[in-house]
Image: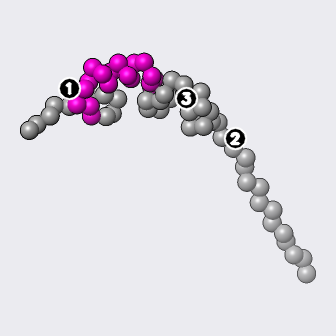
Amino acid sequence: MHSISVLCSKRDVSAANFSLHEAHCLRFLTLCPECDEPIARKDIKDHHAEAHKQVRYTPLLLYVIIETG
């Protein structure tokens, strides 16, 4: 027996379940504008803060100790 699947946001969904899946996605999920991953609407702020936080670059300072004899 073969099943037909439909691609939805990088995932295969059975065609028989697609309308229910689509309704769930539209209601509860959103695509992150930065990484295009489906994220729960209630978690989008946390996702953005954690997955896309700005990392401050601090140059590594090297100290060289020169011994004089």
Local secondary structure at mark 1: helix
Q: Quadrant of the N terminus?
A: top left
Residue identifier under label 2: 56
Depth check: give the residue in front, 28 or 35: 28
Q: Count of labels shown?
A: 3
Magenta region, mostly helix, strand or loop? helix
Residue identifier under label 1: 16
Instruction: Specify which label sits upstream in the sequence, 3 or 1.
Output: 1
Q: Is residue 49 magenta?
A: no
The three-letter code of the residue at mark 2 reads Arg
Residue identifier under label 3: 43
Give the number of the mark in front: 3 or 2. Answer: 3
Give the number of the mark in front: 1 or 2. Answer: 1
In the image: residue 26, left or right of residue 14: right
Q: Position of residue 37 (x, y in %)?
A: 44, 32
Q: Is residue 17 magenta?
A: yes
What is the crowding at mark 3: few (fewer than 14 residues within 10 Å), some, or many (at least 20)?
A: few
Q: Position of residue 68 (x, y in %)?
A: 90, 76
Q: CA distance from mark 3 to mark 1?
A: 28 Å
Q: Are marks 3 and 1 in contact (CB under 8 Å)?
A: no
Q: Residue at left 20%, top 26%?
A: 16
Q: Residue at left 91%, top 81%?
A: 69
Instruction: Point out the stretch of residues depicted in magenta.
Output: 12-31
